[in-house]
Image (spheres, rainbow, N blue to C red):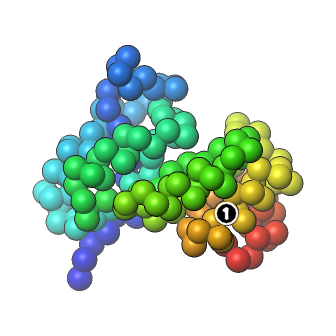
């Protein structure tokens, strides 16, 4: 039986080449190569790699680079921006990217998105259109997350 880790984050060190948006209380780096080596050590066959929002926001380019270097080991999930009027196009492009399996909405209280935000509706309609599951991160804001989910039962 294959063992799949349901959520990993990989990221490079904070450098001018790939600067972080914020500096969380995480190790200085957890690169894709390091993650795959760690998976090999403990017998994990694959993982769902969620692009690290804290560092890279909506830029999943590092995740794509890592997946290309380790095809078949990592499936990709990208946070998408409800404030982007072209978010449906972003999701359509993401669907064409090899190794992608889903999208993520950041709905923490800090993110400040009202559950009736039309950007969230655009994301969820596009998720249905492009057959993507949606990961809703709504810690500390579960009622708002549930309201969005209830409005979009097809996702």
Q: Is residue 131 left or right of residue 5?
A: right
Quadrant of the image containing the C terminus = bottom right
Residue at x 22% of width, y 49% of height: 69
Residue at x 67% of width, y 63% of height: 126
Can you name the residue that lies furthest to the right here?
116
Whether residue 15 is visible, yes or no, is yes
> In the image shown, does 42 or 125 lie closer to the viewer?
125
Residue at x 27% of width, y 72% of height: 3
Q: Position of residue 46 (x, y in %)?
A: 27, 65
Can you name the residue that lies furthest to the left here?
41
Residue at x 51% of width, y 26% of height: 22
Whether residue 35 is visible, yes or no, is no
Q: Position of residue 72 (x, y in %)?
A: 25, 65
> In the image shown, does 27 or 126 lie closer to the viewer?
126
Q: Is residue 14 left or right of residue 152?
A: left
Mark 1 crowd level (few <14, some 14–19, many ≥20, 10 Å Cα)? some
Q: Position of residue 153 (x, y in %)?
A: 74, 76
Q: Which quadrant would residue 39 be assigned to in this image?
A: bottom left
Q: Secondary structure at mark 1?
A: helix
Residue that badge 1 annotates: 126
């Amino acid at each position: 039986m294959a063992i799949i880790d349901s959520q990993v984050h990989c990221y490079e060190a904070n450098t001018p080449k790939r600067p972080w948006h914020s500096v969380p209380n995480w190790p200085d780096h957890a690169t894709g190569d390091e993650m795959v080596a760690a998976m090999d050590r403990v017998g994990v066959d694959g993982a769902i790699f969620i692009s690290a929002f804290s560092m890279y926001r909506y830029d999943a380019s590092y995740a794509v680079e890592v997946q290309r270097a380790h095809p078949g080991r990592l499936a990709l999930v990208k946070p998408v921006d409800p404030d982007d009027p072209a978010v449906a196009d972003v999701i359509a492009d993401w669907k064409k990217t090899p190794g992608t399996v889903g999208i993520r909405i950041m709905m923490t209280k800090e993110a400040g998105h009202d559950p009736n935000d039309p950007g969230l509706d655009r994301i969820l309609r596009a998720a249905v259109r492009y057959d993507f599951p949606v990961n809703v991160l709504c810690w500390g804001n579960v009622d708002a997350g549930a309201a969005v989910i209830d409005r979009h039962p097809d996702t």
